[in-house]
Amino acid sequence: MTAEIPNPIGRLCLIALAPLVLLGVLLVVIIQTWPGDAIGVSQHPPVEELSFSAAKLRPNEISLSVFNDGPDTVTISQIQVDDAYWAFTSDVGTILSHLQSARLTIPYPWVEGEQHTVRVVTSTGATFDHEISVAVETPQPDLRYFLAFTLIGTYVGVIPVAIGLLWFPLVARLGRTGLAFLLSLTVGLLLFLMVDAGQEGLEMALVLPESYQGVMLFGFGVFGAYLGLESLGGWLRGKRQATATSGWALALLVAIGIGLHNFGEGLAIGAAFALGEAGLGTLLIVGFTLHNTTEGLAIVAPLARDRAKIGQLVKLGVVGGAPTIVGAWLGGLVYSPLWAVMFLGIGVGAIAQVVVQIVRQLVPDGPVMRFMSTAPALSGLSVGFVLMYATGMLVG
């Protein structure tokens, strides 16, 4: 009679599940006993916190979303518009539990170009205000609206990047010193974009409802994109090792990083028009168009020692510029600050990884700072920063 051999996989599953089962038992005990009742926590007044998304305006109607960002249930009892009480409807009722949202519709004869204030009054008497700075009817998504954002994204992203790619013949004729200057200039351009997107992403993260943990979401996007592009870069270099130099792989990584950043620019432009801020949207179009021309130069810089065909340059231009169109679509049609924070974080992480890749090519071994302090590298960094700063002033 042979002894039964224990199943090692089954034993591992039991070991893995045992702590989870004990954790579940502990949670049940906590809920059943609820020690907070013993010290009178349940007698304290509820903590109410409501946040708003941007209002949508239709003729004689204001519609806005409210989100329960607090730990306790909130009951919406009344709505005031410009200090007068108005009837309203809610798509999910007036009682909102934690993390629940509702769309409130208020029949109100708003005046175009005027400022209006919507105040939500809860059952406890707490009030939460949302200000509509300039009342403008929210555009209705249709084919013409869709085509307009496509054209805007093309003007802002695709065409300027393509114009910058025309510097490739000049880049291909540079010597060693000129190449060091140009790659350092690229680093300066990308560092400016990284800091700019990082500042914007953190500012938006701080005004998100606290339950969304905007800063953590932004950080997750940064590190996720960095590690993802690091893995993609290694795969590209390995895949093309027998047929191409590392210049093409690096150019593609630069285009991807810039494309992710341009996606965020498209979101900003689309949202500006969707929220009725046409003046801001027009300013962003002009500023980003000039701003993005230098990005084409950053994309072709790693190809200085490679022979690139027109088709390859077109692909790089599409990768770097076309995401602006997608961003404009999403910003104008279904804009969400939550997704904006996430994608800005992804753009920052992607650009940071591309900067590391370029520095690796510039300084394969030896002290990085010693090389960056040389005349070609230092002047390239400075020129790159100055270019982006000058064109960025048109946006800010």
Image (tube, rainbow, N blue to C red):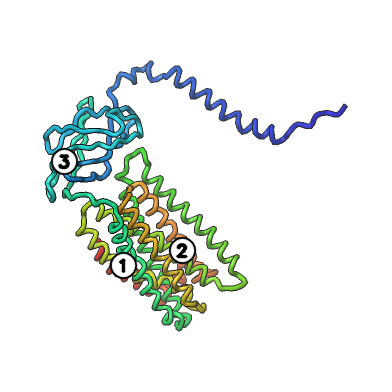
Q: Give me the disc on residue 117.
A: 3
Question: What quarter of the picture does the N terminus occupy?
Answer: top right
Q: Is any part of residue 212 visible from this angle?
A: yes
Mark 3 belongs to which amino acid? Thr
Q: Secondary structure at mark 1?
A: helix
At label 2, counting other C-alpha atoms closer than 10 Å, the crowd grade (few under 14, some 14-19, many 20 or more) is many
Q: Is residue 251 above or below residue 40?
A: below
Q: Position of residue 207 (x, y in %)?
A: 29, 45
Give the Cα separation between the discs numbered 3 and 2. Answer: 45 Å
- Taking the view exactly as shown, the residue that stands out farthest to the right is 1
Eye-nearest disc, 1 or 2: 1
Q: Nearer the viewer, residue 146 or 282?
A: 146
Q: Identify residue for label 1.
A: 155
Mark 2 belongs to which amino acid? Val
Q: Is residue 320 above or below residue 94?
A: below
Q: Is any part of residue 269 visible from this angle?
A: no
> Circles 1 and 2: CB distance less than 8 Å?
no
At 50% across and 55% down in the image, what residue appears? 227
For marks 1 and 2, the one nearer the N-term is: 1
Q: Secondary structure at mark 2?
A: helix
Q: Secondary structure at mark 3?
A: strand
152 vs 322, left or right, is left
Q: Identify residue for label 2.
A: 354
Mark 1 belongs to which amino acid? Tyr
Eye-nearest disc, 3 or 1: 1
Give the Cα separation between the discs numbered 3 and 1. Answer: 36 Å
216 vs 48, left or right, is right
Question: What quarter of the picture does the C terminus occupy?
Answer: bottom left
At label 1, counting other C-alpha atoms closer than 10 Å, the crowd grade (few under 14, some 14-19, many 20 or more) is some
For marks 3 and 1, the one nearer the N-term is: 3
At 51% across and 71% down in the image, what residue appears? 248
